[in-house]
């Protein structure tokens, strides 16, 4: 937009009449009107040419024919002047002069000049290769050696407009469009065309199209801000690439196609794990292209970048991330935040729900996402029994948008629509890990409380393997045979009041004398609440009565139906 200070040379009608009146009063020497134009004769009666002469307070220029110049750019002793339609020298004024080369190689329609109080146009008077700037009405402008106001992108070391599509890469200043020209200070949104690196910076994002509108920040000197991810502006942090474009969305100095392979492949060995975490921890998030402020510290939920997590990027899956005080995200760790602990996978996404982790309690070496591995009781127990000693189940709130923190102690967790009781360590280096083994007289596997099914009422639990079996299966697996209480006959397994034995006691004696404690020494009896039955007798869903000796040991199994 043309600035109000830039006006064409116009002389009022009153001024014109005043000038005309004074000129017609000139004597034989001095100003004379000839053939519709004004000329000037010196005292010798010679017509003056290529020189300035006064009329009142105004100066006028006589060309090489001695005629008064009008509406013209005058070059005199390497200086430039302008005379208006009445021939008077212009002072303290902007003037737009038609460009004879308009339209050629991005040339503007007009060139703007500023003529000082002495009538001289501002021009680059510095040594070659140095920018020339002047403050006019509180704004700074740049002029070339011919007095033409420069605009757009300008390099510090030549001070002239650069018309290349990628001029923003090489130039230091931006001076607005051809009818503006004021040096940019502070934020400025600038359209870029045919950006050379558009296809490689951030594939798949329209923000990186070849035609872009990008934010730049210019210091008080007019020089653009470049190569920073920690620039404070109005109390907020911003980033700028090597060419001055404000960084938006995800950014890491190391992000490139080679390292991007880390976000595509698994991390099954320590070397790859370490590399993946290190790579992810370099990423920062700078908000939208319209904002650009860096998330310096705290939570934010967005879709990860192409180079950070290709799968989630491709699926459009948003994740929670946490920025440390330097803006870089947490990744591959269990981190304390405001008194609570949170877990982040190897690519920085917050982990929620039931999670299988290989961790020392702080650094996460591996995160086994469920993918059906433990989404039911059966699959959970299979996974828990096969996992290595350096693995463990942890539980982080299922409501990731509200909490997401680590949970300890007893928790109710749903697997395939069925609720189960879990218990997680409350302290130590393995805080949060699901308990395996006995705790408070109950048995757990990977944190899951071992209970008998409601239909079975009671089950036998192997204390070493934490496997549960029904009484019937225990009988069959161990080849136990029945002994009739009345007759003492062995092998009558389906009759009432049959005591099961391993057959080592022979066929004589009474039923009450039969004892299988040695056979069941690795087992305890658990009920539907997970409690261990210590003494007495309990009948299961199949009609088997299990008799205990008062020390949790199974003494007899008796068929009751």
Image (cartoon, rainbow, N blue to C red):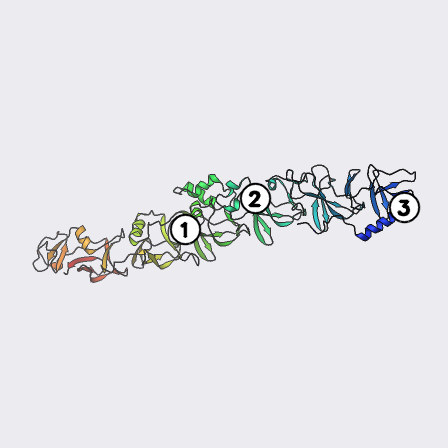
Marks 2/3: CA distance?
67 Å
Considering only order in the chain, which callout, 3 or 2, is on the residue closer to the N terminus? Answer: 3
79 relative to 236 in the view: left or right:
right
Check disc 3 and report its element: helix, strand or loop: loop
Q: Are marks 2 and 1 in contact (CB under 8 Å)?
A: no
Question: Percent x, y for residue 193?
Answer: 57, 42
Question: Percent x, y for residue 501?
Answer: 14, 54
Q: Which residue is mark 3?
A: 26
- Of badges 2 and 3, the one in the foreground is 3
Question: Percent x, y for residue 234?
Answer: 60, 54
Which residue occupies the extreme left position in the image? 487
* Nearer to me, 2 or 282: 2
Q: Which residue is mark 1?
A: 361
- Of badges 2 and 1, the one in the foreground is 2
The disc placed on residue 57 is none
- The number of callouts visible is 3
Marks 3/1: CA distance?
102 Å
Q: Are marks 2 and 3 in contact (CB under 8 Å)?
A: no
Considering only order in the chain, which callout, 1 or 3, is on the residue closer to the N terminus? Answer: 3
Query: Is residue 551 visible to us here?
Result: no
Question: Percent x, y for residue 465?
Answer: 27, 51
* Nearer to me, 84 or 493: 84
Considering only order in the chain, which callout, 1 or 2, is on the residue closer to the N terminus? Answer: 2
433 relative to 124 in the view: left or right:
left
Q: Which residue is mark 2?
A: 241
Query: Is residue 178 visible to us here?
Result: yes
Check disc 2 and report its element: helix, strand or loop: loop
User: Is disc 1 surrounded by few (<14), some (14 to 19) or many (20+) residues within 10 Å?
Assistant: some
Which residue occupies the extreme bottom position in the image? 536
User: Is disc 3 surrounded by few (<14), some (14 to 19) or many (20+) residues within 10 Å?
Assistant: some
């Amino acid at each position: 937009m043309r600035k109000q200070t830039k006006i064409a040379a116009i002389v009022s009608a009153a001024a014109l009449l005043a000038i005309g009146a004074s000129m017609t009063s000139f004597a034989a020497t001095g100003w004379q009107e000839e053939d519709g134009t004004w000329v000037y004769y010196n005292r010798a009666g010679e017509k003056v040419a290529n020189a300035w002469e006064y009329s009142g307070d105004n100066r006028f220029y006589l060309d090489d024919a001695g005629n008064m110049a009008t509406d013209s750019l005058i070059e005199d002793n390497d200086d430039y002047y302008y005379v208006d339609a009445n021939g008077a020298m212009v002072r303290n004024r902007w003037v737009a002069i038609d460009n004879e080369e308009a339209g050629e190689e991005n040339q503007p329609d007009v060139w703007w000049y500023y003529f000082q109080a002495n009538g001289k146009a501002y021009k680059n008077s510095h040594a070659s290769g140095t920018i020339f700037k002047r403050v006019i009405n509180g704004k700074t402008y740049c002029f070339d050696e011919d007095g033409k106001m420069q605009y757009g992108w300008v390099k510090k070391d030549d001070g002239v407009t650069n018309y290349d599509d990628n001029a923003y890469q090489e130039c230091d200043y931006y001076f607005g469009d051809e009818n503006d020209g004021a040096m940019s200070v502070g934020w400025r949104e600038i359209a870029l065309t045919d950006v050379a690196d558009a296809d490689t910076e951030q594939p798949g994002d329209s923000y990186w199209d070849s035609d872009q509108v990008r934010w730049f920040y210019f210091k008080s000197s007019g020089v653009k801000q470049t190569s920073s991810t920690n620039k404070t502006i109005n109390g907020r942090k911003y980033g700028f690439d090597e060419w001055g474009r404000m960084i938006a969305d995800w950014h890491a100095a190391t992000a490139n196609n080679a390292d991007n392979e880390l976000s595509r492949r698994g991390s099954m060995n320590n070397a790859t794990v370490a590399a993946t975490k290190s790579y992810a921890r370099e990423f920062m998030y700078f908000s939208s292209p319209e904002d650009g402020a860096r998330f310096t510290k705290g939570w934010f939920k967005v879709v990860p970048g192409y180079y950070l997590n290709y799968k989630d990027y491709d699926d459009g899956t948003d994740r929670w991330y946490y920025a440390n005080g330097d803006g870089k995200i947490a990744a591959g760790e269990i981190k304390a935040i405001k008194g609570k602990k949170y877990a982040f996978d190897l690519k920085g996404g917050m982990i929620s729900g039931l999670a299988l982790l290989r961790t020392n309690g702080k650094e996460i070496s591996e995160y086994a996402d469920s993918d059906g591995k433990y989404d039911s009781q059966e699959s959970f127990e299979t996974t828990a029994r096969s996992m290595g000693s350096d693995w463990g189940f942890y539980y982080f709130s299922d409501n990731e948008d509200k909490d997401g923190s680590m949970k300890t102690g007893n928790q109710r967790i749903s697997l395939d629509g069925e609720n189960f009781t879990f218990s997680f360590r409350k302290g130590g280096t393995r805080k949060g890990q699901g308990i395996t083994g006995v705790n408070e007289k109950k048995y757990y596997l990977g944190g899951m409380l071992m209970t008998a099914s409601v239909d079975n009422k009671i089950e036998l639990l192997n204390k070493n393997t934490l496997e549960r079996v029904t009484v019937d299966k225990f009988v069959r697996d161990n080849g136990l045979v029945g002994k009739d209480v009345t007759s003492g006959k062995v092998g009558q397994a389906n009759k009432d009041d049959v005591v099961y034995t391993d057959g080592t006691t022979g066929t004589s004696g009474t039923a009450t004398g039969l004892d299988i404690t040695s056979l069941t020494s690795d087992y305890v009896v658990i009920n539907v609440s997970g409690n261990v039955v210590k003494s007495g007798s309990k009948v299961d869903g199949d009609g088997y009565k299990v008799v205990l000796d008062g020390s949790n040991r199974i003494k007899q199994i008796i068929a009751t139906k």
